[in-house]
Amino acid sequence: MKNATSPTQNVSQLQRQIKAQQEEIAQLHLLMEKKEAQWEAAKQSLFEQFRLALERQFGPSTEKYRVDQRDLLINEAEVAVDEEDSDASACDAVADDAMSETASPPKRRTRGGRVALPPELPRVEVVHELPDNTCHCHDDGTTLKVIGEEVSEELHVVPARIEVIRHVRRKYACPTCEEGISTAPVPAKLLPKSNASATLLAYIATAKYQDALPLYRQSQIFARHGAEIPRNTLARWMVQVGERITPLIDTLRQHLLNAPLIHMDETTLQVNQETDRSASATSYMWVQRGGPPGQHVVLFDYASSRAGRVPIELLDDYAGRLLTDGYEGYAEVVRQNGITHAGCWAHARRKFVEAQKMQPKGKTGKADWALNQIRKLYGVEKQAKTFEPDARQALRDQKSRPLIDQLRTWLDKSLAQVLPKSALGKALHYLDNQWPRLTRFLDDGLIPLDNNPAENAIRPFVVGRKNWLFSHTPSGAHASAAIYSLIETAKANGLSPCDYLQYVFATLPTLGADELHTLLPWQWQETLPV
């Protein structure tokens, strides 16, 4: 019997082995397919990063997308890609309605021709007369009379002139007793022990922090004009100025924290000499902006960290509205203070612009549809620019909310169709993660669509950083933050930064702590040329 059953058992055992091997091979095939998909996704991601790096390095800096608006209005890009017949008519109707109310023909700039010189500039007349031997008629010798004139203008620059102001303090004494000598008081100065006037300090600060002119170049310019001022001296003056204007910065901060809405952003900064930190360590410059029209405050603050404790310190007990990008470092202060936290549509849009650059040329896709939808949101905001908050919110309910609903439906469908690590996938997931903050503007007419005011305020710092590269010490970084705050606050209120700094530097030493509010830009705005 054993010999009879043995071949059957062997065949059965062999079949089981073959089946197990087939299952193992099938699992290996599945694993290979999964790995191949992962490799393909990684390759596509690297390819997109490479193309985006080339675009950033050599492409135009504009974020305008290249699809013809008329194509998007007549036939939505998403319809061309996914054939979504159900939503196409609704999207087209909204687009046509938005264009009919917001679109205007682009203004064509006239090329060529000379730009007229500003009429407010002072004029110096130079009268040109005929030579004496040509002032008589060549026929009968009669003296010629003036019958008119031809006027042409040329722009003339008076080079900077450095001069020394001598403060002569008279001494008085009694001629009889020759006692009780009295001397005129010392004029109040921002930096009492220096020989720098308020005008010179304002000039240096404006050149560096507004015009991005490093101090070593300013030192060279002064030397060409006959004044040898070492770079270290200029740097010391700026640090001392930053320390002296700190009380005014605190006054501005109190005004800012009473604003109904604050924009906030941060950017990197390198400080070479900082305790317990390497010279290559990354520090940050934070910016806050807020206030009603005509009373804007822009504040810069240096911090060695980007941690959540920094906005907690800067915002103190503020409990209003906060508009930021997608950085999660603001979450703790939002939770502690009960702040209404809104997101920035410009950041969301920027990611779709990057995704659109990865598309084949001449092709439209999901990124184009998202960009077009965001464009419609901005079209509604353009209509409501001059509205009061309640009227703006009512218009948003009527026009923006349907656009947001369409975008949400499209987003839910698209998330399952796109690789998460692709440029488009990153844009979709950013939009999904930030959705609660991005849609908060629908419920509050005071909340704008984006954080551009903060980004515009921080841009001069970023431009300057490319020239002067770093700060040597934390004290220098804090001084830079204080001076940037005054300059950007002056600009936000329509003032000349140099004139404002000159007034502050000359007046601050004469004021008490309870009089600092008189230096706020909106207190005396009309006294300065704009």
Image: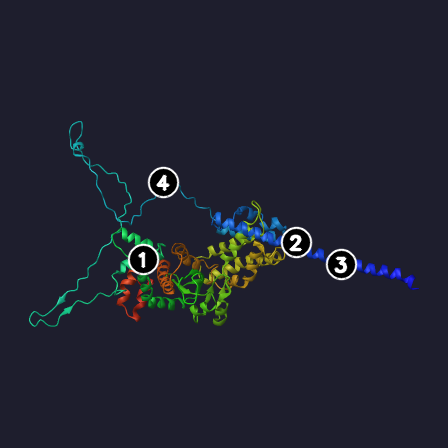
Task: Name the image quarter holding residue 282.
Answer: bottom left
1 vs 4, front mark: 1
Label 2: which residue? 36
Q: Earlier in the sequence, mark 3 or mark 2?
A: 3
Q: Is residue 208 visible in the rendered structure shown here? A: yes
Q: Which mark is residue 287?
A: none
**Secondary structure of residue under mark 2:** helix
Q: Which mark is residue 231?
A: 1
**Secondary structure of residue under mark 4:** loop
- Identity, as a three-letter code, of the amino acid under mark 2: Glu
What whole-number distance in Å separates the C-alpha atoms at marks 4 and 2?
Answer: 62 Å
Q: Position of residue 462 (x, y in %)?
A: 42, 56
Q: Earlier in the sequence, mark 3 or mark 1?
A: 3
Label 4: which residue? 113
What whole-number distance in Å separates the C-alpha atoms at marks 3 and 1?
Answer: 77 Å
Q: Position of residue 90 (x, y in %)?
A: 59, 53
- Identity, as a three-letter code, of the amino acid under mark 1: Arg
